[in-house]
Amino acid sequence: MKAFENTNGFKVIQQWMADKDISPFKFQIDTWQKFGNGYSGMVVAPTGFGKTFSVFLALISDFMNHPEKYGKGLKMIWITPLRSLSKDIAKAMQEAMDEIGLDWTVGVRNGDTDPKVRQQQVRNMPEILVVTPESLHLLLGQKNHARFFQSMKCVAVDEWHELLGSKRGVMVELAVSQLRKYVPEIKIWGITATIGNLEEAMDVLIPYDIKKTKITAKEHKKIDILPVIPDEIEILPWAGHLGAKLADKIVPIILESKSTIVFTNTRSQSEMWYQLLLDAYPDFAGQIAIHHSSIDAHLRIWIEENLSAGKLKAVVSTSSLDLGIDFKPVDTVIQIGSAKGVARFLQRAGRSGHSPFETSKIYCVPTHSLELIEVAALKEAVKQKVIEPREPQVLCFDVLVQFLMTLAVGDGFYPEETFERIKKIYAFQEMTAEEWKSILDFLTIGGSVLKSYEEFHKIVIMEDGLYRVTSRKIAMLHRMNMGVIVSDAMLKVKFISGGYIGMVEEYFISKLKKEEKFILAGRTLEVAMIKDMTVYVRSAKGKAMAPSYLGGRLPLSSNLGHFLREKLSHTLNPKASEKELKFLHPLLANQEKNSHIPKEDEFLVELIKNREGYHLFMYPFEGRLVHEVMAALIAYRISKLAPISFSMAMNDYGFELFSDKEIPLNEGNLDKILTRENLMNDVIASINSAEMARRKFRDIAVISGMVIQNYAGKQRSNKSLQSSAGLIFKVLEDYDPNHFLVRQAYTEVFNMQLQEPRLVEAFKRIEKSKIILKYSHTFTPLSFPIKVDSLRQTLSSESLDARIKRMVEQARKNG
């Protein structure tokens, strides 16, 4: 270390930091030293501790120590998951280099970059280029692109925990592999916040036999987790109703803070809370803003700049502001509802008090009282440093097909050499030679089934064995459709008088009745007409709907589910000191009186009979995705005992099966209904897995280029995409059921939609638990939120309010 600290590079950086009245952390110095010694690696540090500078300044230090080793042109590619991050990162890097006295430039290249700037970069690359995974793949699809990378020393992947576990992460793995082809000695560095599977995260990004190291910061971020407690406890809780009541408690928090980010989990929730805050405190007009991915990019950039400059009192946001370099004035974060996961919660908390020695302050606002147990669970998880793993995706053949097309529209590829390289990538280590041959056949002649269709003959094999795209039309369509985020068809929203506002999903607009109003970017709008995938609107006043997006709600993570069950089992313990649990005592005492509070080694089942009919509730606390599958499975198993049909509802805590017939369930047959035996066979029988795979295949077909979503100036509707993909899926199922993309569709259904690994673990736990069956004539505090969620799907808000009042009155009488 001493030898390194005497180098010219270290002294320059140390002096630059001293001038700014800061000194480097040990993990930063370690990174600079290891980089200089030829290592690749992973830097792990909390938000706000200078992870970016650990890797970026490593390159600067190494250059100053060995300028003779560096050629002209691009020296580092910096991959970031969000476009909105790129500008912040580039600005911070450029400022540092200017102050250090280095005449390098930093460029940004993504979908928001001006085409003139992109052309300029192609002629003369900056020394550092900040890109998204999609932009990097577009670079790899250019002719003679190898010339850009000849002087490259490092590829850095920022916020790797955000990319790992998604198909965008697989895009990064493929791009890094290609860069290694051009520069075999290139260093690969990942930057991440803490995740549960750190070793695996490093192996996925750097699976190569090279010198690598993991550098973990010893420093820890101090976090204050502060629940916002309602004034009174309700007998029965339900989701969404506390908002208006608690908005009055949030106003003082915002007023007392320099600047606040109010995080919500969905875009529609952010629109709703923006209105609630303005209604609660009209003076916020002009001082608060709303930020989510469906709002016009220019408006988002304006909001980010004004938040950084301290000109905004608060911004209501979705995960679009989860990541970022620095919003220095932000000293407070408010989380509406549960964050649903420990990692996401820590990421959001870290947006406040961004400098290392400040405490991050995060207020948790429950949307119904039971979410206060989640606050207690989060505190415990943070205390024990238990963070979710991000499972890497493997054998994503649709992404591989797209990547090979990218290479083919660029300079082409030779299959033997490419296969050897791709087999080293974590995602494709298990790929067989037979699967590889099927992929090549698919790209050249459409495979055995589609060979009669000219549009699937995309790649031409040249005389020397090079695989290339020779058709300009095919190349153009491929470039227009690159990427792995297949959104539902989005419609632009514009004023009739001119002016772009943002985007809404096709399915939401299709549900609006004439003259119904909706809100977007905090404005109340009325639909005037819809033409060419554009909704023309005029300003309006009065009651309006927040757009719902099919992205839906975030499911509870398994880690948080574990702590939730643990906290719930101790809620009536007189020694429980958490103020959240003390506040909830009357509600939980009501649960114990009318039913039961399950201990950690118990599994609660409730059978409730009332005037409506028969209700079965079960509480696995495994998140709504797992509960959706479990509900279908349990319904199927019960229907084998006697013919009966159910309607289903679920939330993150449990699920309901409702019937007008008596449910044939008792202590004698409950074990059989909840057995782990024959689990996945019964799941397949209980759901239409072929239909689910057909729907999943739509995204796979778009990513692999089988179905084209974007044409020049046009985007195909969901209906059209689903119809084309469904037709191809049926043909492949009938004539080539073992097709690699059909198999991938079923695999994704089982791993992602049916959550097979988590489902199996849940049933293992239930098998070891004592099953408690309780009968009641009234809804319990645990069952009531699930019931209300199911009613919300079918009733208008006025009817729902009246219905809830009646149910609460009935519970009071019975209680």
Image (tube, rainbow, N blue to C red):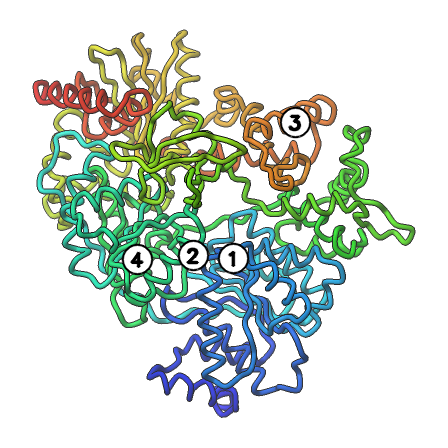
Q: Is residue 264 left or right of residue 455?
A: left
Query: Is mark 4 in CB contact (under 8 Å) with mark 2?
Result: no
Marking on residue 195: 2
Q: Residues within 10 Å of mark 4 (few under 14, many from 20)?
A: many
- Residue 729, labelled with which disc? 3
Q: Is residue 277 visible?
A: yes
Nearer the observer, 438 or 309: 309
**Callout 3 amino acid:** Phe
Q: CA distance from mark 3 to mark 4?
A: 44 Å
Question: What amino acid does circle 1 point to?
Answer: Ala
Give percent across and percent down for residue 357: 28, 72
The part of the image, by quadrant, that contains residue 321 is bottom left
Vertical side of 303 occupied by 106: above or below: below
* Distance between the alpha carbons at the discs numbered 2 and 1: 8 Å
Q: Nearer the viewer, mark 3 or mark 1?
A: 3
Give 778 or 666, whichever is nearer the viewer. 778
Quick check: marks 3 and 4 in contact, CB under 8 Å?
no
| 530 displayed left or right of 270 | right
Q: Which residue is mark 4?
A: 349
Depth check, mark 1 against mark 4: the one in front is 4
Give the secondary structure at mark 2. Answer: loop
Q: Residue at horizontal 44%, vertical 65%?
A: 88
The image quadrant of residue 474 is top right
The residue pinned by badge 1 equals 201
- For marks 2 and 3, give the CA distance: 37 Å
Instruction: Measuring from the top left, give residue 797's x and y in whole percent.
Output: 25, 25
In primary-sequence order, the first of circles 3 and 1 is 1
Circle 2/circle 1 CB separation < 8 Å = yes
Q: CA distance from mark 1 to mark 4?
A: 23 Å
